[in-house]
Amino acid sequence: MTNTDDRRLDRSLDRLQGRLPNWIARPVGGLRKPDARWIRIPSGVLLIVGGFLGFLPILGFWMVPLGVLLLALDVPFLRRPTAGLMIRGERRWTEWRRKRRRDPPA
């Protein structure tokens, strides 16, 4: 892994954190600090495990990508694919929103 992967992931997370409401952006920023590793790794694993039980009430499949995102901050081989998926997802979201503004519902 290179520092490029780290920078891409950090930039993607910065953009995501900037779009979040302040009450949730602050804890997310705290989780991104290097000394929060002991919280991130177990939380990421629990979110992934809980996501596989997504058919149960309260738990959901949405927990898997969130858990992978948390683990990607500490597991080097997850950084590149996670950053790539975040960038592609952000592009698709932006394109979808632009298209929706251009083509209002009839």
Image: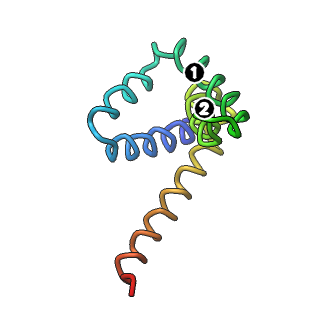
Q: Which label belongs to residue 43?
A: 1
Q: Residue at x 40, y 29 (%)?
A: 28
On the image, which quarter does residue 13 sit in? Answer: top left
- At a point 66% along the width and 29% down the height, the residue shown is 50
Q: Amino acid at mark 1?
A: Ser
Instruction: Classify mark 1: helix, strand or loop.
Output: helix
Quadrant hosting residue 62: top right
Return the x and y of residue 88 as percentages of the image width and height.
56, 58
Q: Check the picture and name the quadrant holding the N terminus.
A: top right
Say which amino acid is labelled 2: Gly
At 60% across and 32% down in the image, what residue appears? 67
Screen quadrant of the C terminus: bottom left
Q: Residues within 10 Å of mark 1 (few under 14, many from 20)?
A: some
Q: Position of residue 43 (x, y in %)?
A: 57, 21
Label 2: few (<14), some or many (≥20) within 10 Å? many
Q: Residue 65, located in which quarter of the rendered image?
A: top right
Q: Identify which residue is drawn at 60% across, 26% down.
A: 44
- 64 in relation to 101, above or below: above
Which tag, 2 or 1, sits closer to the chain's start?
Answer: 1
| Residue 12: % across, % down | 46, 45
Query: Which residue is labeled 2 in the image?
Result: 67
42 and 4: which is toward the camera: 42
Asked whether residue 1 is in view, the answer is no
Q: Where does the image place residue 5, in percent across and percent down from the top left?
A: 57, 41
Tell whether label 1 touches label 2 (CB within 8 Å).
yes
Element type at mark 2: helix
Nearest the viewer among 65 and 15 is: 65
Q: Among all residues in the image, which is located at the extreme bottom?
A: 106
Quick check: 5 left or right of 35? right
